[in-house]
Amino acid sequence: MSNAIIELKNISKSFGEEDILENFSVEIERHAFVTILGPSGCGKTTMLRLIGGFEVPDEGQILFDGEDITSLPPYKRRLNTVFQKYALFPHMNVFDNVAFGLTIKKVDKKIIKEKVSEVLKLVNLSGFEKRSVDSLSGGQQQRIAIARALVNEPEVLLLDEPLGALDLKLRQEMQLELKKIQTKLGITFIYVTHDQEEALTMSDEVIVMNNGKIQQKGSPIDIYNEPQNAFVASFIGESNIIDGIMQKDFLVEIAGTEFECLDKGFDDNEPVDVVIRPEDIKFDKQNGKIPGVVNSVIFKGVHYEMRITAADFDWIVQSTTMEPEGTEVYLDFYPNDIHIMKKVK
């Protein structure tokens, strides 16, 4: 039995002559923090707006808990949305901003007070009820926008790049806060971003999109460690993607040298893409198999990033130890650090 709370089935959506999504299908698991990740223009925000009811598909169905909501307006859907622009009401104080949805529904004032107090405590803003929203910092305003959405007790919360306007330190803090809130409430969060760090930090599941298609769907660990194609490998973190030949199961040729790997199921002597993360490359003067020369060194705080020319390829290597520019080095990697992907035709 499916545990999906939201299903998009064979969705197509165009704007003018531009096809954004074509015959697109995906399931969103109940109680999960799901991130839709991809570059600008890949269709991720369109997907979120379709789920929220702000756009209607040209074709296909949207199901919520098995019920067809394709034509249902946003205010009748059991979900709420937090946008990148928080759209707070500047003429209202914090309490009235958070209470707005309940007030419109004519909920009893005593219940409104209890619910607003509860969500403000959840977002660590108790005591801010009478403050003007214009007097709050960007991070505090973002929390108010989340509280305003949560006070309506949605089953699903949609978040459209809500941290984009915050500085790096605050954004990192809010990533952890959002995950804590989602875990405590147990509701489904669907989060749209182009920031890979956000996706890997917060998510139970990541959906990587490009050109209106899903490139890979899985846990952050699987997405990072086992990318299914070159796009995912290059978009999630930094990668060395080099041509290789899969000689047979568990044996790949890289730069004319044989390496044991953990991959199988390819044809003998099949051309493949080989992915090796910069942090997985070892320097080994005794046993290293690929000779190269260090071209540049950059200190990045927790590690050095070196560019190394080896076998007519510009390698990125990240290490806590540094080899000076001009040094001859020998590269090596363990079998579980080599990831083999089929060539995209």
Image (spheres, rainbow, N blue to C red):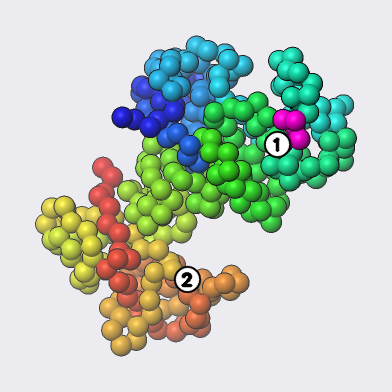
Amino acid type of the residue that numbered disc 1 sits on in the rendered structure: Val
Q: Quadrant of the N terminus?
A: top left
Q: Find residue 59 and report its image quarter.
A: top left
Please state the extent of the stretch shown in magenta in the rendering: 114-119
User: Outermost residue, top direction?
Assistant: 71
Vertical arrangement, residue 15 with respect to residue 163, above or below: above
Closer to us: 122 or 76: 122
Does the rendering let one see residue 143? Answer: yes
Amino acid type of the residue that numbered disc 2 sits on in the rendered structure: Gln
User: Outermost residue, front direction?
Assistant: 110
Q: Secondary structure at mark 2?
A: strand
Does the rendering let one see residue 40? Answer: no
Left/right of residue 141 with respect to residue 306 in the rendered view:
right
Mark carried by residue 119: 1
Closer to us: 238 or 225: 225
Residue holding disc 2: 318
Left/right of residue 126 with respect to residue 165 in the rendered view:
right
Q: Is residue 178 magenta?
A: no
Across and down, in percent, residue 161 comes to 61, 39
Q: Select label 2 or label 1 by which is in front.
A: 1
